[in-house]
Amino acid sequence: MNQLSNAFADIEARDVTHVAALDIGSNSFHLVVARIVAGSVQILHKVKQKVRLADGLDKQGNLSPEAIERGIETLQQFADSLRGFKPDTVRIVATHTLRKANNAKAFIRAARQVLPYPVEVVSGVEEARLIYQGVAHTQENAGRRLVIDIGGGSTEFIIGTGFKPVLLRSLQMGCVNFTQRFFKAGELKAKYFSKAIMAARQELEMIDRKYRQLGWDVCIGTSGTIKTIVSLAQDLNPQLKPGTVSKAELRKLIELCCKAQHMDKLKLAALTEDRVPVFAAGLAILAGIFDSLDISLMEFSPAALREGVIYEMEERLAHHDIRERTAESLAVRYDVDTDHANRVLRTTMNLYHQVAKEWDIAGDEAQNLLGWAALLHEVGLQINSRRVQHHSGYILQNADLPGFNQEQQELLATLVRYHRKKVRRAEFAEFTQFSPGQVCRLICVLQLGVLLNIKRQDDFLPQIVAKARENKLLLEFADDWLQNAPLVAADMQLQAGFMLSCGISLVVR
């Protein structure tokens, strides 16, 4: 043992970072814990709990108290595994059900009482992108891939090459909501399968032609529904390539379901008890996908959304944030004056760093979103210079922004929407990570950064000292500069009025 101990003692210590991703899905919650060593991701353990959150979504779009309670109880079970993790090493990502629930904020607030990390609700397109990243980082490069993920509330379709997705779509069909529509009573009849398959094909009508035209070299399926179907297909046809399923096996499985007549009587070796209630719906969806996209063979990948989140966290920790590339892409697409954008960024960040702590807006998330708002505040000039703040805000609210979750995108759009003129707090969305007061303070900092660069000139501004106290901001300009800049002084008087709409008093010297 001494020799072994000495041998380990001689190994050079390496930087190791532990990270975790929690996927709040419509059917199951998944937790993945990994470590990052020398830029390599090593999965340590995975935990899955069936929650069927989507079952609690009523016709009005509200989550039932029982469904919320089930979800929070599951998060409490995961809490021990996450104890001790730093804030920037954990991401909790929520998908279809919380995208659709009117009372999603109630769930998120309850979750924050259990776990000290924010819940990020991601768009369907962002979910698709993360799924693709999970597959791309764990599968060998097989040319152009079509990746399909059948979840509890939605199904994602992605075509990409290497690490770059080309087409991304998310359709509102999943094994939980299709169970409610077609198999709620548990009966397994051919007519119910026919209706469910037709409904899946109808959902695909809007995308199938485009996907078939682009084409793919290999089709890959992910997540629990497809994993179960692939396992059953192997039992039915041992001659199949391992880890794959073809249309023939799907048809055979549908026949076996119809023979059983009811879910309670469905006995298949690889079909676990917790998968039975949603199996028929998932099978029908996959059969419809095979028909619409003319798929001959699908391979299974064990990686999915949570692995994509893990690999993206590794990139962020290595300072390769995809959101930076998204901002750069928008700047190019909308022909942003990058020299001016950087002037506004420098002034905004200078003011921010002076007031952030006192105004309770310090933190990487606030700083990053404020910085991107400064860089992108003029994307709306492509539409019209009049009411540019409205146009810019609209673009950022409605564009696909890879890497941004829904709340980040909403806050970015809000900051830009109010980068000039009066602020209307009543129009703010409800944010879970920022109070209305914090949003107002961030807006005020951005407004000043924009206003002070109105001449669009380098070396125009003197040194500025900013001092914040609760709802008051003092700006001091060096060398009596303001006295020799009457237009700026007049603009500052107007700005003081705008900031009062945020409840903030501006004093300028």
Image: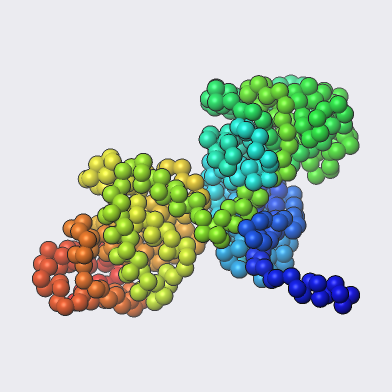
Q: Give the residue at x 58% y 66%.
A: 87
Could you tell me which quadrant the C terminus lies in? bottom left
Q: Give the residue at x 20% y 59%.
A: 457
Q: Is residue 6 left or right of residue 462?
A: right
- Give whichever of 142, 403 is nearer the camera: 142
In the image, residue 257 sits, relative to residue 68, either above or below, namely above
Residue 490 rendering spot, x and y as whole percentages: 13, 65
Looking at the rendering, which quadrant does residue 172 occupy? top right
Residue 199 can be seen in this image: no
Residue 364 rendering spot, x and y as whole percentages: 47, 65
| Color encoding of the figure | rainbow
Q: Is residue 75 left or right of residue 462?
A: right
Could you tell me which quadrant the N terminus lies in? bottom right
Count of picture labels: 0
In the image, residue 455 sits, relative to residue 257, either above or below, namely below
Looking at the rendering, which quadrant does residue 199 occupy? top right
- Give whichever of 269, 88 is nearer the camera: 88
Residue 375 rendering spot, x and y as whole percentages: 34, 54
Looking at the rendering, which quadrant does residue 108 occupy? bottom right
Q: Is residue 480 left or right of residue 124?
A: left
Residue 39 rendering spot, x and y as whole percentages: 62, 58
Q: Give the residue at x 64% y 61%.
A: 38
Q: Give the residue at x 34% y 78%.
A: 469
Residue 210 can be seen in this image: yes
Q: Is residue 403 left or right of residue 252?
A: left
